[in-house]
Every structure is written in structure tokens, then in C-alpha cells.
Image (cartoon, rainbow, N blue to C red):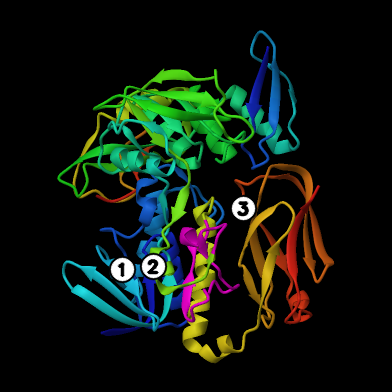
Amino acid sequence: MKKNLTCVACPLGCSITVELDDGGNILSVTGNTCKRGDAYARTEMTNPTRSLTSTVKVSGGAHPVVPVKSAAPVPKSMLFDCMKEINQVTLQAPVKIGQVVIQNILGTGVDIVTTNGC
Amino acid sequence: MIKYDLAVVGGGPAGMAAALEAHKCGVNKIIILERAETLGGILEQCIHTGFGLHYFGEELSGPEYADRFIEQLKDTNIDVKTDTMVLDISQSNVVTAVNKTDGLLQIDATAVVLAMGCRERPRGALSIAGTRASGIMTAGTAQKYVNIDGYMPGKEIVILGSGDIGLIMARRMTLEGAHVKMVCELMPYSGGLTRNIVQCLDDFGIPLKLSTTVIETHGKERLEGVTIAKVDAHNQPIKGTEEYVPCDTLMLSVGLIPENELTKGIGIAMDPVTNGAVVTEMRETDHPGVFACGNVLQVHDLVDYVTMEAQIAGRGAAAYIQDKAAFENAEYISTTPGNGVRYIVPQKMNIHSREDIKLYFRVSAVYKNAKVVLEADGKVISSKKKVKLAPGEMENVTVPADVIASLAKDSTVCVRVEE
């Protein structure tokens, strides 16, 4: 099986093709023009992660929501599950920037923290 | 009338960085005038991460990036007035502003930094046929609704324009449970960053339809759908390619317009390509003591570049406040965009400058394996190989100080692309 990716390691945006066997093992990485592209493609195929940002509800604040982020990238496959958790939280004002909202979200080892005050 | 050394119009990333830099250079009385209720400008609603990679070496969200500067301002004696709208800047650099507590304010400023940023191109600028149903808004307006006001502006979304704000909103709306059906782009390429195409569209299987535009909107009270069509090489819709797409929301991410009403009010010379002021290497406009930086000068891809440009303007304003005479002795030549280059900022450079001058520019099309050539008086100064050049990525080339020293009043400096 072949998978096509666009590399985001730099603005060049190389089109990379990854060849996989039936067990999902990487047979080859082609189309990249540097080592970073190879590493990007392998991570994307084995354990893709993304930074997640959203908002959580605040009661009694200047605005009804405050922005949050995952303190580190979380597995790409868990983005929507993380969103469900984030959407259940309501904070009480005053909220400070950098405050932990959810510790170790869904066992990922990653905290959800506020990125502004409210 | 209140007397200040420097008045900064706009408290976004450009205004804050310019004020802080001028302060660092020893300017004592500085005031920032901001229209919104808080400092930070558009960063406050840009809750995604990716800001600050170049400047801070880490990935911050918009509010976090702004907070770094807001905190620095607290440690200075720089005055800040929020909720304050600047109405006019006079020929003698008197800034007239208004707010609820002071009423009408008049600030006699030795120097002024213009840092008003941009607003989004609205629907009216596109002349799309159809009714005025609700549910049609700019992507930035939708971003404010979701990220600041905390509500969803729609469920079935079509986005027109693949600028970064549109791409970011495609992901944001999807994560919050909306169905983003497609992003249409008039041009045959996207104006957004590759990373955003991958992480905001590809990740969620949102199709990007290139050379496609919205030609009609449908619905009376609320938007019910749009008609999209392919466009030809002249960006004209092709008959027979029309397609009806049901949706309740159309988001527009079709470009930014620098907010230069104040600039034009002073009568400052404008660059018709950037829609910003014509500036020198210090970012001084042709009106003595008035500087410009950030998105009001040229639309930037990254806030880090806004910060760096604002610091140049801040240093320039400080130099002007401390030694006006040096500015009067300056002799300027124009920088000329050559083949494949749309514009250069700064448009003018002082031939008596003793420092290297970086010229920032954008190319007019996508180039592969091309060279960026810098010429002075017809002589090649540098020729740099580039694997890829795209209009969406701002480029720069440095004019070394020893080259500047060799320039005369009638010299030419040109940047061009060689294929």
C-alpha cells in the first residue's frame, strides 16, 4: 500500500510517498529532499501527533470562554475524544494564563492549560 | 494638549513591539492608543499555536504571544490607553483621539508609529450575486464568535479563500462539531502556509477546490446554499461547471486590507501594491516623524516578522526623536522590484546608512529552482539559489553596508527573480 503526504517540516512542502506492507510496516519513503522529511513521514505513519487548541467555558468572567491548549502534542487519533473532555469543563473566574484545566487528559500524559486570562 | 515623545497608534503585536523598542532605545514619554478593550490586537482571537517559532523559539498561541509583550509593557512607564479611537493625525503630528473617560484627547507627539493592522476584505468587495441572508461572514468574524464570544455561527460550512485564517477556521469549526464541506480558492494555488493545508484540511479530509469560486448565494433569511463554479485562466467562471452546495454558513478568507485611513488623512505617499505607506529602511513614511510597521505597512505571514519590523520602526522613531538633524541629511534612492518581484519594503533607502539593509519582498508567482538576484547600478551583488519561491512566503535579501557606501544619488537597487 502507498500513502501520499505533504511534508510540513519546512515551507518547501515536498510530496512524500510512503510504501507500507500488509502489516503497516514502512518499506520505503520517497519524494523527500532531506532527512527531516524522512523523519516526518515515519512519525506520521507510526505515531502522528498534533497540538490541540480550543476554548473552555468560564462563568463570571469578562468573556464566556477562555482559550486552552494541550501543553504538548497529543495523538492525532484522539483529537475528537480530547475535545469531548474539554467541552465538559466550566471554570470559575478569575482565570489565570497557564492554569491547568485538565490534568493528563485521557491518560496521554498531557495537560490542558489556559492560554489567556479571563 | 498632552506632550509625548512618541505616540503609537494600535496596541497589537506591531504597536507593542515598536513602543518597547523605542523605550529600550531611551525614549521616555511613550503612549499606546488602542481601539479595542485590551492590548494584543488580532492575536487575542488567534487561539491556535504556531506563533513565535522564529522570535521566541517556541510555539505559542496568539494570546500567549501577546501576553509576553503585555507583561513587558507593565515593567515600563509606557502609557496605554485602550478603548481609545484615534480620529486624526495632523500635519504637525498632533494625534486626536476619543474615549469614554477622557472625551476628546489631543496628543502633541514628536514622532508617531502607525500600527493599525488590517481588516478583512468583506463580501461587498467580491460582488457575489445573491440575497443578503445571514450566515455570510469573514473568517475572522467567525473566529471572534467562536473563540471570544463562545458560540458557533453555523453547522454546514463552505469557506471561500484559502488564506491562513480560512484554513485555521476550517479546523476550528470541525473540532467543535461543524461540517466543513470544502474550501474554494480562486487561484490555482493556495495562499496559505503548507503546514495549515496539511494540519487544517488534509487531517480532517476537507477538500480544497482550486481555481473555484462562489458565484451565487441562496436563501432569504438564512443562507441555504451557494453555487460554486470553476474559473478559467482569467479567473472568470466557466459555464457548465456550476454546482449547488447546500450550507448555512459561508466564511470568507479572501485577503486583508491595511487600515490606512489615518495614513491617507495625513497625505502620506502610498504603495499601490502593498496598500501601505512608502517607507524608508527605518520605516519612516514621507511625512517627517511618522513611521509605519506591521500589517498596516504590508501584510505579513508570521507575527514574528511583524515584531521584527516593528522593532525597526521603534528604533527609527527613537533615532528621529533623539536626532532629527540626521534625518534631514538623508538622501534616498528607490528600491526597484524587477522581474518576478511584486513589491519591496522598504521602497526607499538612505544611501548614507552605515548598516546593512534587509529588503523584504514577495514574488509574483510560484518558482522552482530559481535565483534571487540583487543588483546595484546594474551590477550583480548577490545571487541566491532558491528551491522554491511562492507569493505566500515573504522573502528577504540583504544589501551589505559596503555596497550602500558605494551608492550615489542616482544609483539603482533592484531585486529580481531569474529562472
Residue at the spot 45% in from the left edge and 63% down from the top edge: B14
- Among the two numbered marks 1 and 3 on one chain, the one whose residue lies closer to the N terminus: 1
Query: Is residue B280 part of the magenta span, yes or no?
Result: yes
Secondary structure of the residue carrying numbered label 1: strand
Q: Nearer the viewer, mark 2 or mark 1?
A: 2
What residue is disc 1 on? B86
**Start and end of the magenta stretch?**
B271-298
What residue is disc 3 on? B394
Is the residue B390 above or below the residue B170 in the image?
Answer: below
- Residue B373 is drawn in which quadrant? bottom right
Q: Nearer the viewer, mark 2 or mark 3?
A: 2
- Among the two numbered marks 2 and 1 on one chain, the one whose residue lies closer to the N terminus: 1
Query: Is residue B289 part of the magenta span, yes or no?
Result: yes
Secondary structure of the residue carrying numbered label 3: loop
Is the residue B307 above or below the residue B109 in the image?
Answer: above
| Cα–Cα span, label 1 and label 3 | 30 Å
Q: Using a 10 Å C-alpha cutoff, classify the residue at mark 3 as few (fewer than 14 neighbours), some (14 to 19) or many (20 or more).
A: some
Q: Using a 10 Å C-alpha cutoff, classify the residue at mark 2 as few (fewer than 14 neighbours), some (14 to 19) or many (20 or more).
A: some
For residue B262, the mark is: 2
Residue at the spot 79% in from the left edge and 65% down from the top edge: B375
